[in-house]
Amino acid sequence: VQFPSALAVRVLPSDTMSQPTVIRSTTSALMQQPPAADVPIEKSQGALQGASLTFKDLSFTATLPNGESKTILEPCSGHFEPDQLVAIMGPSGCGKSTLLDMLAMKKTSQYSGEVLVNGHARDPVLFRRIAAYVGQEDHMPAHWKVREALEFNATLKWQHNATGSSRKNVGGFIDNLLEAFGLSSVADTYIGGAQVRGISGGQRRRVTLARGVAAQASILFCDEPTSGLSATDAELCVKALRVIAKRLNVLVLVVIHQPRKEVAKLFDTLVLLTSNPGRMAYCGPMAQASSYMAACGYPIPVQANPTDLYLDLLTPGAESDASDALVAAFVTRQKPQLDQVVEEACAVSGLTAKEMLMAAWELKGPAGKGAWLGSYAVPFYVQLRTLLLRKLHITLRNPAAMSMQIFMPTIMGVVLGTIFQGIGKTEFGIPQVSFIFILLTMLSLQSLPLMPALIEERAFMKHETSERLYKESAHILTTMFVTVPLSLIGAAIQTLIIYAFSGLPYEFLPTILGWTLLLFFMFDALFQCVAAVAPDGEQAMTMATPWLVVFMLFNGLIVTKATAPVYLRWVFEISPTSYAMQ
């Protein structure tokens, strides 16, 4: 028995097989009522430019902390055509996610092999314009709404100025996605998080998957999108992915763990890997996998879930372990034909990423304008505007952020002002110096509690920038335009309240206010730098504390140049608190 390699399935002539009825419904109707696995779906007139994916001798070897090398994935090859739904399965440690990351250009470590799109090497600049990636983690702001999350990706991934009918349909497309992924009832609900009540964990996972689909990329990579979902929700999501693949001509690759029988039937192609090290054991049509296993001597019981048996056979050390035998069978039965398909695919050159974007522009873009061919789908000002709107919305919805930056400094200003009330009417001495010291100290500490929030924002910023949604500089400017001004307002309010209570002459106010705000800017910048490199909030506090303590000690009051050791007097030259005290 000969079994074709991945996606090398040939459709038999009509006189040799019965043709099932093809569904010719609208995309909206199909998303709302996804058809069964055995029902063909007609391609939409507005389908995307197709992208085939070919990989040859792709492998990865990791270097352990002790210097030894460990092979995660041995060389493997394959070829996938557009409009296919591909499942990548295998036991833990087989290299499923590693393979997906290498195909998606997400692997930052060095690996060997080559990956081609339409017969061309991946364009490092434009590949992420035609591809989208859904990772294992859900990185989203807690005070974001579900609909806003999908609109965000659509706004930043759809080609700029392709507004005409395409942009007008964004809202309708988002409504279809919400319906398809079972999110219509929570469309205006917060995403939520550890401290914010919102949608459930399973719904949050579906939002992440829907965001990837909203990008309307020709290739969609999904790393365990059904993890944490119920069997019913998992089937709902995979059905939606199938509609997207068939209707919009999208190649969808999914890493998935032991789906139930009904879900497995939705996939066109199956890639099976085994572990220790990762090796390919099957690459071909999902419908023929059971026959292949039977031909290899491992028949599937009638009532059993085939995917359960596949993993039992491919898990080294399991009771029914047959991983080595299946790998050997793959080498003799499938690999020669698969290598031939790969060579043929490498010899055929289709559209490049640039040509795909230009073709999509001609189909949907306005006449008389050229396609936007930069690394990002939209210009910088659109990125900045979109990020500013999101930042303003989630900040205004977050009581903790407003209280931390505005209300708490106001309360502290009243408390400290009461303590130092009328101090300006007494003779100058230690109390006035202590007043200045406490005022500067409070301004130095004001941005310290914001570091955990900045680190949390950094998490989803890294994911979104890796998807080429926007530039890192757009995120930094957004923080400068929203977070920093709010903190500055809080610092100014605190200083003015304390000064009003103190009774000091108002002729000194410009000097004191200017130096206190300058010191605030200095420490705010310092804490933002620490938050940019610290792994988490606790380590950020640990890294920031030494700087804060040293600068507060070497301020000319607690430690002066006369009393400081000679070899430490240089610290006064870099201490911002010292300049402010002077």
Image (tube, rainbow, N blue to C red):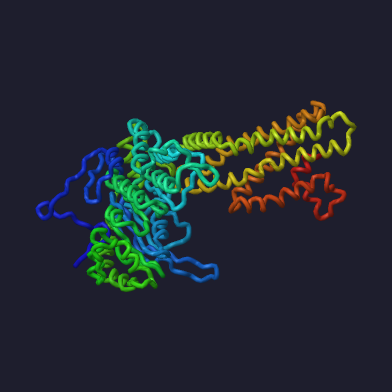
Residue nearest the observer in this picture, 146 or 499: 146
Residue for point 42% across, 56% down: 101
Position of residue 320 in the picture relative to residue 8 (left or right): right
Residue 24 visible in the shown view:
yes
Residue nearest the observer in this picture, 336 or 240: 240
In the rendered image, residue 492, in percent from the top left (x then y), is placed at 70, 32
Label count reads 0
Position of residue 116 in the picture relative to residue 564 (left or right): left
Instruction: Tell me which corner region of the image, top left, top right, bottom left or bottom right, holds residue 176.
Output: top left
Dividing the image into 4 quarters, which one contains the C terminus? top right
Residue 470 visible in the shown view:
no
In the rendered image, residue 417, in percent from the top left (x then y), is placed at 77, 33
Position of residue 388 in the picture relative to residue 450 (left or right): left
Residue nearest the observer in this picture, 433 or 366: 433
Instruction: Tell me which corner region of the image, top left, top right, bottom left or bottom right, holds residue 10.
Output: bottom left
Position of residue 153 in the picture relative to residue 436 (left or right): left
Outermost residue to the front: 303
Dividing the image into 4 quarters, which one contains the N terminus? bottom left
Residue for point 39% across, 38% down: 185
